[in-house]
Image: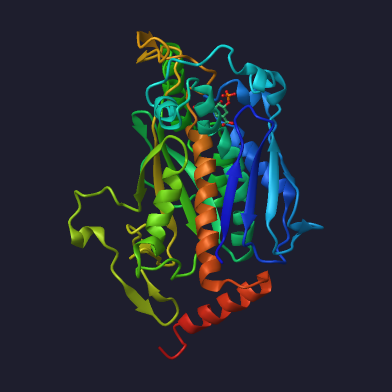
């Protein structure tokens, strides 16, 4: 059985919940590191009022004893502090009260109202809210710790905000990573961050919102995760699907995937072999994936986030109670959540990589997984008689 998860929870309900199933026994979990990832998700220039209210932290209910995984399902809860102020609206008494009837173009509101037969968009938006990504990040934090145990590291930076894109880059160094984590724009170059803040300020002043792009990198991956033998085993399809599962992500690029201007001889990464390094490349335009399989080079992905559809200068819509033209309702929101999306993107990538790693090397214990990886790496060594 492979690694799997479920999340549940409404934005203003009591809590967000997550269950992770399939973790091997024997992994020491650093709870503080999980909460650190949750805090990272809350940061970023352009965030709205909700992040001033919450101090997200994960409470572990099962599957771990004395910080060590038991191999049983790991249940986690992230409590919504703001629930206190929304108890009434989230209670049965709220039925029959004021309704949210002016759906926001670009949000799940109208599709959800029609699909589930509701007459109040609150019944849709509570679950469609990107608040659910707190549960995603808690799961990703666990996956990241499993990966770290085997030398795999996942990190991210913002790659664009609005019309200003950063140059394409390679995985950040340790010093750059420290600068990225210290930046409210989740980027190492302060000059770029300043320009991006200007874009966010401009949109805030216009009553608008703005999207952008995030880059996710993973280093230390062995060659051979994922498979070309069937579409749903391709790691590229699984990573793109996972990234598009994040609210507001509309496109994913793998390596230089959108560089359709490059002919084949300039796009692909020539293969070399030396006795010291074995097979290697001098370029990584594949983004670390060929045939849906990891090449052993750093994984490089870009995910593109649309502007948040909730705006103080709302778009035209229709009131579902009257069918009269109306302006979309404004709910407290963020002007820009691209830095937070980078942290969420890291989490889903970490999860998919952990799942792929366990599929290839899985065992009941972390020690079993370690032995399987060691045997495989030994088979691939340049001096292993191949
Ligand atoms: C979010 C919590 C939400 C929003 C935001 C993300 O909380 P609230 O609705 O109480 O302000 O701030 O979600 C959206 C912008 C959206 O459209 O879903 C969070 O925890 O990240």
| Front residue of this view, candidates 93 and 244 | 93
Q: Would residue 186 be visible to someone looking at this image? A: no
Residue 11 appears at what percent x and percent y? 60, 30
The correct choice, above or below, for 205 with respect to 279 in the image is above
Location of residue 87 by image quarter:
top right
Q: In this view, does 217 lie to the left or right of 268?
A: right
Furthest residue to the right? 66
Image coordinates for residue 263, horizontal then vertical, percent: 17, 56
Q: Which of 134 and 36 is in front in this view?
A: 134
The quarter in which the N terminus is drawn is bottom right
The residue that appears at 33% across and 29% down in the rendered structure is: 163
The x, y position of residue 91, in whole percent, is 67, 22
* Image height of 207 relative to 70, above or below: above
Residue depicted at 69% across the width and 46% down the height: 76
- Rendering coords of residue 167 (x, y %): 36, 41
**Residue 366 appears in view:** yes
Report the side of 138 relative to 193 (left or right): right
Q: How many labels does the image show?
A: 0
The chosen color scheme is rainbow
Quarter of the image that includes the C terminus: bottom left
Displayed-image quarter of ligand 1? top right
């Amino acid at each position: 059985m492979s690694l799997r998860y479920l999340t549940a929870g409404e934005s203003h309900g009591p809590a967000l919940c997550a269950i992770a199933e399939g973790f091997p026994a024997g992994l020491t979990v650093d709870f503080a590191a999980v909460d650190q990832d949750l805090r990272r998700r809350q940061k970023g220039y352009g965030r709205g009022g909700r992040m001033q209210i919450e101090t997200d932290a994960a409470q572990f209910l099962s599957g771990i004893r004395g910080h060590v995984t038991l191999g049983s399902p790991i249940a986690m809860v992230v409590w919504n502090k703001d629930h206190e102020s929304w108890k009434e609206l989230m209670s049965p008494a709220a039925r029959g009260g004021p309704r949210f009837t002016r759906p926001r173009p670009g949000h799940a509101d109208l599709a959800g109202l029609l699909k589930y037969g509701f007459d109040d968009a609150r019944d849709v938006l509570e679950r469609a809210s990107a608040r659910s990504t707190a549960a995603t990040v808690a799961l990703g934090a666990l996956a990241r710790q499993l990966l770290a145990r085997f030398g795999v590291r996942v990190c991210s930076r913002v790659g664009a905000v609005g019309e200003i894109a950063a140059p394409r880059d390679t995985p950040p160094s340790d010093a750059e990573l420290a600068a990225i984590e210290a930046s409210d724009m989740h980027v190492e170059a302060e000059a770029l961050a300043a320009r991006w803040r200007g874009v966010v300020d401009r949109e805030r002043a216009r009553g608008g919102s703005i999207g952008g792009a995030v880059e996710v990198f993973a280093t230390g991956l062995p060659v051979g995760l994922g498979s070309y033998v069937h579409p749903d085993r391709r790691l590229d399809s699984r990573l793109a699907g996972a990234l598009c599962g994040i609210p507001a992500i509309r496109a994913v690029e793998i390596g230089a995937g959108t560089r359709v201007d490059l002919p084949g001889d300039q796009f692909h990464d020539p293969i070399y072999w030396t006795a010291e390094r074995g097979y290697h490349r001098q370029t990584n335009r594949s983004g670390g994936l060929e045939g849906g399989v990891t090449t052993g080079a750093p994984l490089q992905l870009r995910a593109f986030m649309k502007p948040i559809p909730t705006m103080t200068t709302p778009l035209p819509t229709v009131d579902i109670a009257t069918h009269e033209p109306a302006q979309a309702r404004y709910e407290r929101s963020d002007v820009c959540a691209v830095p937070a999306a980078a942290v969420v993107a890291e989490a889903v990538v970490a999860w998919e990589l952990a799942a792929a790693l366990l599929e290839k090397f899985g065992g009941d214990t972390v020690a079993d997984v370690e032995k399987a990886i060691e045997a495989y790496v030994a088979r691939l060594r340049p001096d292993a008689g191949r």
